[in-house]
Image (spheres, grey):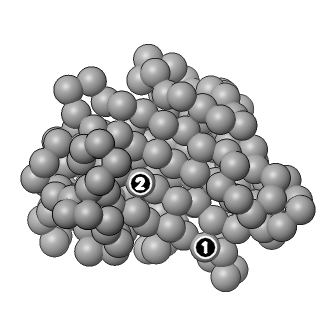
């Protein structure tokens, strides 16, 4: 079973910098968010304030994984993707970054990780509603890279992760 965090659809009202909703590459639904980054400065990002907040308390279970799909057009040009989930007002947040080191491949990458893989700022809690989500993309140097984001979810105990997934 899985619990949706984001489907990257227009109805979710994302605020996007250096990107757009796009249907070129999707894992589910009709859209993904395409981000385009030039240079290593996290210049491409998308932000979402889920109405009423997100309950991600199931993610605190050490047997559950978080998964997000990222399509990369040129893996040699991506420096990293960073996920930020915040409880309240810029104080309490979870942060997870994936840098390259040969990790990314061209095409779809299913990225999976545990709650313990996130670093923290302040005193965030998975048991407290998530009020803000940000996903950022950085290219590796003075090049341009495109990445499509889709189907971000928690896979609960008894769920499965496909064989082409990678752990951060």
Residue at 29% x, 53% y is 91
Count neighbours of disc 2 (C-alpha within 10 A) and say few if under 14, some if 14 to 19, many if 20 or more: some
Residue at 40% x, 63% y is 95
Residue at 32% x, 65% y is 121
Residue designated by label 1: 99
Residue 141 image offset from top left, x and y in percent? 83, 67
Residue 71 image offset from top left, x and y in percent? 64, 51
Front of the two marks 1 and 2 = 2
SS at mark 2? strand
Residue 2 shown left or right of residue 71 in the figure: left
Residue 72 shown left or right of residue 30 in the figure: right
Q: Is residue 94 above or below residue 4?
A: below
Residue 36 shown left or right of residue 57 in the figure: right
Q: Nearer the viewer, residue 113 or 2?
A: 113
Residue 68 shown left or right of residue 77 in the figure: left
What label does residue 84 carry, if any?
A: 2
The answer to whether residue 3 is visible is no
């Amino acid at each position: 079973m899985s619990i949706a965090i984001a489907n990257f659809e227009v109805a979710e009202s994302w605020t996007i910098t250096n990107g757009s909703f796009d249907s070129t590459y999707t894992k589910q639904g009709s859209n993904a968010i395409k981000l385009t980054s030039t240079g290593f400065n996290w210049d491409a990002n998308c932000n979402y304030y889920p109405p009423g907040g997100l309950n991600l308390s199931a993610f605190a279970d050490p047997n559950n994984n978080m998964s997000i799909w990222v399509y990369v057009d040129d893996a040699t040009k991506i420096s990293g993707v960073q996920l930020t989930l915040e409880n309240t007002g810029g104080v309490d947040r979870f942060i997870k970054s994936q840098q390259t080191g040969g990790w990314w491949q061209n095409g779809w990458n299913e990225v999976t990780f545990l709650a313990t893989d996130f670093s923290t700022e302040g005193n965030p809690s998975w048991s407290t509603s998530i009020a803000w989500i940000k996903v950022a993309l950085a290219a590796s140097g003075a090049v341009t890279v495109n990445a499509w984001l889709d189907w971000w979810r928690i896979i609960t105990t008894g769920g499965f992760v496909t064989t082409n997934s990678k752990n951060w």
